Image (cartoon, helix red, strand yellow):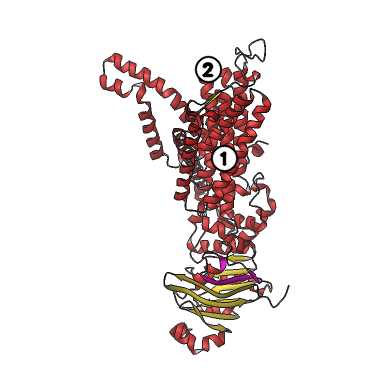
Amino acid sequence: MLSRVLSGDYPRSPILTAALLVILFALALAPFLFPGAQPLNVAAKICVFVLLVASYDLLLGYTGIVSFAHTMFFGIGGYGAAIVLSRLGPSWSALALGIIAAIVVAGTLALLIGLFSLRVRAIFFAMITLAVATAFLVLASQLSGFTGGEDGLNYSVPEILRPSFRLFDAPLFGTVVNGRIITYYIVFFAALAGFLLLLRVVNSPFGSVLQAIRENEFRAEALGYPVVVYRSIASVVSAVMAALAGFLLALWLRYTGPDTTLSFAIMIDVLLMVVIGGMGTLYGAVIGATLMTVAESYLQTILGSLGKLGAGAGIPFVSTLLSADRWLLWLGILFILSVYFFPTGIVGKLRTHWLNRKNKALQKRSGSASNK
Amino acid sequence: MNATVPVLETQDLTIRFGGHVAVNKVTCAFQPGTLTAIVGPNGAGKTTYFNLISGQLAASAGQVLIRGKDVTRLPASARTQRGLGRAFQLTNLFPNLTVFENIRLAVQARAGAGLSLFTLWTDRRDLMHAAGVILERVRLADKRETVAGALPHGDQRKLEIALLIALEPDVFMFDEPTAGMSMDEVPNVLEIIGELKRDASKTILLVEHKLDVVRSLAGRIIVLHNGALVADGEPAEVMASSIVREAYLGQDFEDA
């Protein structure tokens, strides 16, 4: 049963398994474990980014495609929700229309980009995606009548999802189950389902062809796999999942603008999360997205209080270095260190570590057996 | 099927790289149940001719026909789907995948199962079984879980042949299958090719330098020299012809 859910793809390292279980339970019970708006916000962001990063890893890690247009598809999902909700009002049918429209637009656009440009060399494809994504960003901020321009769109969600809505009269385990918590669980379960679906795709015959293309495109073609078709389908699946992630974020934030979905800062975040977690391992997306989101959300606070301590102790240089404004510097240092020490990402490192230990244990056993 | 239509045919097949004509108007037809050896000195255009047939290179002029149908404009994958199978001279595998996964990918290509997104490949018992059989056949069963890039050279050559067999093509194209192999591994490979040759529906093309190998396997030899086809016929006849002696065989022939 578990094997079917995970598509036979186990974490293959006890430390990784433990970390994944902790993250899963923390996210599943976040509203009850970490009360307050800020922690729930971080938890929802983690869910959205796990899905977004996993869908990007399907391209980068599994198929070997470098695309800079991933946040564009994320944005299509976000604006899909935002535009229907602000135009048609906060109804469920509007939401359904929004998600369908977002999926169709994202899928079609990915297919077109793929068929037209996935036959060129990787570096040119990366540049084409960069150009398309830039054009889309400009379009989104210029068509302000439609997208709200730079200000973005504010909108209301269906009543059940609003903070004022109460599911039960009495608090559950000391927490009032309001519309925000219901929204959180929609985000959580949709992201989980999307992640498990991606896990299935990478362990399907199709997924193994993607890895073959990454390994040796030329030979995959010679075996009879039309590489352009496979790459295009991979980018469609990836784009649809990114749009779903954007849709969930829009539902959660009740606001969509260029900065929340389309900006290149997010694209870079996604890249970092994939690399830190480990390319070509979907579990890496979970680890990378969680670590980065937590770091981005709390590093500032932690640094701020450390900086104040430094200032209090009268050490001027330390307080400057630890000031809350320097959090990006520290994030950068964390990134360099992790790439230096874990080039295959955290998941790759943990798996190799465990494999080596198992092999050593095996050798010891066979060694002692032959000694007798 | 009409017996007079060859399974594979090239008509005036030509490729130019700038001013250099690497393959020059080669016209040749291949019938089922035959093994044709393609010989010629280094740089004669043998591998280039193969690349034109299997679609790794696009022809400058001329045609490639599979069962009479023009495939000159089709990509390599489409030609493979129409029954061409190619093994490469320089080993060309999926280096970070295991031996078993390499073979399974070829079996899966043959079965046309690559586009199923939501089944698990481990659930395709039929494909797993077929891959296991081929693994035994090329004697790599003990290396099943080794990644291809970590295999010794001889085993990589065997895996290369395994991928070709797994495709079950109508036309097998071997490009120096025994190159770089140790002497005790060569008979193994020749045995596999010999087995394929006994199947009267299969066509085999073999680029090979070793004349003893050519003589023991081939029913026909074609000779390429400077990209042109200079001789075509039964081994004894071709090896005796003066043009071939001058062009290529020369002292090799005397030694052999």
State the image quarter where residue A109 is shown. Answer: top right
Q: Which amino acid does label 2 sit on?
A: Ala
Quarter holding the N terminus of chain A?
Answer: top right
In this view of the protein, which residue sits in the foreground, B9 or B237?
B9
Counting residues from the start of the chain, the first of labels 1 and 2 encountered is: 2
Q: Are marks 1 and 2 on the same chain?
A: yes
Dot 2 alpha-carbon crowd within 10 angstroms: few under 14, some 14 to 19, many 20 or more: few
Mark number, residue A37: 2
In the picture, measured across the screen, residue B11 lies left or right of residue A325, that is: right
Dot 1 alpha-carbon crowd within 10 angstroms: few under 14, some 14 to 19, many 20 or more: many
What is the chain identity of the residue bearing mark 2?
A
User: x and y percent of residue B238 in the render?
Assistant: 54, 85
- At 60% across and 69% down in the image, what residue appears? B172
- At 69% across and 72% down in the image, what residue appears? B201
Residue ranking furthest to the front:
A145
**Which residue in the structure is indicated by mark 1?**
A239
User: x and y percent of residue A266 in the render?
Assistant: 47, 33
Magenta residue span: B53-69
Residue ranking furthest to the right:
B1
Q: What residue type is labelled 1?
A: Ala
What is the chain identity of the residue bearing mark 1?
A
Residue B201 visible in image: yes
Residue B144 visible in image: no
Numbered-mark total: 2
